[in-house]
Image: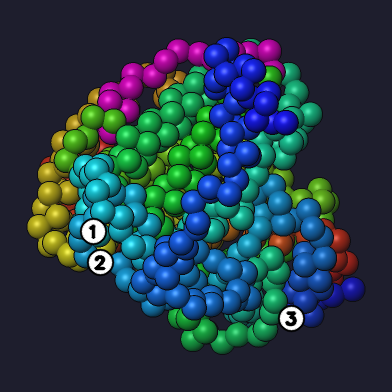
Amino acid sequence: MVKTAAKTDSKTKSKKTTARDTVASAAEVPKPGYHWMNRSNQWDTRVKPGKHGLRLGDLNVGIYGEIPEQWQDQTRNPRGAIPRKGVPPLGYSIRDKADVWADSAADLYEEAIQRKWAPATDVPWGTVKPLSEPLERAICQVLTELCQYANCDVETISQWQHQMSYGYHEVKQYLATASFDAARMHEAFRKRALCNGGGLGLEGPGEVNRMILESRGGWSEAVTYLMLMRGTFTMTLLRYLEKFAYNDAEQSIYANALQAKARQMTYALEHLQYSIAHDEERKAIMATLLFIGDRIWEREMADHVLREALCIVFAGGLEKAPDQGYAIYQKMQRDFMRDYVGTCEWLGIKRDPAMLPEAMADYLEAS
Amino acid sequence: MAKFPSVVWFDAVRKVFNGDESYQGAGGGQCNCVAGMKVGNKIFILTFEGLECIDARDGKDKDLEEVDFYLDMPIADWRAMLKNIAENNRATRDCTLNTLDLDREDGLSTSRHGDQYREDLFFRYNQTFQFFFDASARVKTSY
């Protein structure tokens, strides 16, 4: 009967009859060979969950845990799988382990996945109450610039991610969470700016963002600018904003953002340490990068908008902003310089105060 | 009533902390580290594993060389922090661990090994530690 119907409409419904034909000719279905079933570099793998569950790092057993110093495969072949012949190369530019690796990447991925928060529901938005207009404007200005920082994180990580070889998947997976963390920060900062009668303020100068986004010397260079330099400052800033939060919502936002930035710092420090351990010259390269970066940093910090807004936030309003607020702002900058230079030295990168821009050297000396 | 500082007090806080699922979300969650608490001259070692604080014990000065980081304050400052938490059901912004770390000349969190990776656990798990001490609001405390 099916054949009859197909015959009747053969001219007008040739496409529709294809499926019917398939049914009709079921006997002609190619006989499966299942030859692929015997193809595995390592079969009978039985990773068991540990006391913290089945974690990404636990899977690094046997050949699946062999992470070469250089990843030769140019396709998306998962580490440990059998490569298929004829797959066109993707042109990954980052193929050396020293250019991406950090031993903690798998754990940081798990941590980021597990220690999650949802700004929509976890932030107690109801605690945000009307503030004086200057204070609300100052908070919104700071948040405007923090949104830009978060966006810079997302864009920078994303533009490097696809250049990283698939064999170092732990790093790629962690960085996916770092990008998501930044997106969530952007979300939370924007929500706070738009929920209390204020609105976004003036765009920041963006010179440091441009420096980070346009760094072309490799992922480690981007990490140096994005995480070591900007990341240390953002952490310091978030810590001060949490201390000077005006409601539980802000405190929650800054505290959660701080944890995410701390994960990013952990990755950055481990990666840079690993990178330096594999190529001593990288210390000198990083010192040069920081010498250049410091000058752009100083120029951006000279912008009065963020400084004035922070002084108002720290002082609780306009009245005490020029003295009390500014004193706290200076302490924040001193703390930043202490941590930034301290981290550089922990990595073995000597920072000569005489070679720092004047304002940075002053803050360092006073720290 | 548990007397601060003592293992009994930390155990009482552990019980509240471990039993409250709200501390496991909203920025809390799995936390794996060993943290020292230096309360004046007394030392306590807390072990966090997974979603819980699984152990609190007395420690010695040399134990501080082994922990990932430790919190160090004079006993009067610990009391002030805990009283603030008890009065407000959680730390107000002047008494959070973050604020105390910022306000103290040598910080609140420190280590003897100088390994920044381990020291930074204080920041990576900061909400968990804050939740832990906030849980003390539900422990009747004597000093």
Q: Residues within 10 Å of mark 3 (few under 14, many from 20)?
A: many
**Residue tagged 3:** B7
Image quarter of the C terminus of chain B: bottom right
Element type at marker 1? loop
Q: In the drawing, what numbered circle is on residue A13? A: none
Q: Mark 2 lies on which chain?
A: A
Label 2: which secondary element = loop
Residue B85 percent across, percent down from the top left: 77, 54
Marks 1/2: CA distance? 6 Å
Q: Mark 1 lies on which chain?
A: A
**Residue A165 locus on image (x, y percent):** 29, 51
Where on the picture, by quarter, is residue A151? top left
Q: Read off the magenta span.
A: A196-212
* Residue A248 position within the rendered picture, expressed as x and y whole percent measured from the top left: 71, 37
In the rendered structure, does residue A201 fall within the stretch colored magenta?
Answer: yes
Decide: is A21 above or below A266.
above
Image point 42% across, 15% down: which residue? A203
Instruction: Please give the residue where the numbered disc 1 appears in the rendered image.
Output: A71
Q: In this view, does A364 lie above or below A31?
A: above
Question: Quick one: A206 or A85, which is closer to the camera?
Answer: A85
Q: Do the residues labelled 2 and 3 touch (CB within 8 Å)?
A: no
Q: Which residue is drawn at 64% across and 18% down?
A: A8
Quarter of image, res B114? bottom left
Q: Is mark 3 on a helix, strand or loop?
A: helix
> Are the residues flagged by discs 1 and 2 in contact, CB closer than 8 Å?
yes
Q: Label 2, on which residue? A: A68
Any part of residue A314 in sight: no
